[in-house]
Image: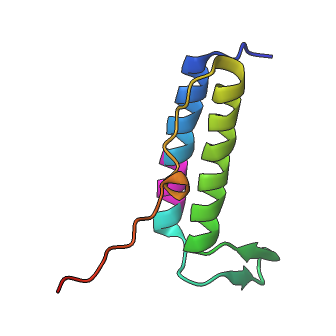
Amino acid sequence: MPEVTLESLRKAMHDCIGKGIASYLKAPAQRGYSKLAGERIPSKNDVARATNQNCRYLNEMAQSLFGESIFNDPDDEVVVIGTPKD
């Protein structure tokens, strides 16, 4: 079993994002089903959600083991709603 270091988690994060981008570009807009292979074809949304979930997990590992965040999750940012101008 390889040793888990902060650098190995960062590398895994970059690999995950790279594979996610490649899969996202190949994925159809709507999920489908391949009768030939007998399996479900994930949509762009499915791929994006899975990639984001994997990145969150790697970030949680980095935070719990090393106390350092390696991923800026856009869902954790506070949404500010503007006010109308008079």
Q: Is residue 65 magenta?
A: no
Which residue occupies the foreground of this view, 47 or 40? Answer: 47
Q: Main secondary structure of the magenta part?
A: helix
Q: How many marks?
A: 0
Q: How is the image coloured?
A: rainbow
| In the image: residue 25, left or right of residue 52 | left
| In the image: residue 73, left or right of residue 59 | left
Find residue 57 and report its image quarter.
Answer: top right
Q: Position of residue 39 (x, y in %)?
A: 79, 74
**In the rendered image, the vertical position of residue 50 relative to residue 55, given as above or below:** below
**In the rendered image, the vertical position of residue 46 relative to residue 69, given as above or below:** below
Find residue 59 and report its image quarter.
Answer: top right
Quadrant of the image containing the N terminus: top right
Quadrant of the image containing the C terminus: bottom left
Q: Which residues are magenta?
A: 18-23
Q: Which residue is found at the position 57% from the left and 43% from the top?
A: 16
Q: Position of residue 46 (x, y in %)?
A: 64, 69
**In the rendered image, the vertical position of residue 84 relative to residue 75, given as above or below:** below
Q: Is residue 22 magenta?
A: yes
Q: Which residue is found at the position 73% from the left and 83% from the top?
A: 33
Which residue occupies the foreground of this view, 72 or 54? Answer: 72
Q: Position of residue 34 (x, y in %)?
A: 73, 80
Q: Which residue is found at the position 54% from the left and 58% from the top?
A: 75
Q: Residue furthest front?
A: 86
Find residue 66 and report its image quarter.
Answer: top right
Q: Position of residue 76 (x, y in %)?
A: 55, 53
Which residue occupies the foreground of this view, 49 or 79? Answer: 79
**In the rendered image, the vertical position of residue 49 relative to residue 72, given as above or below:** below
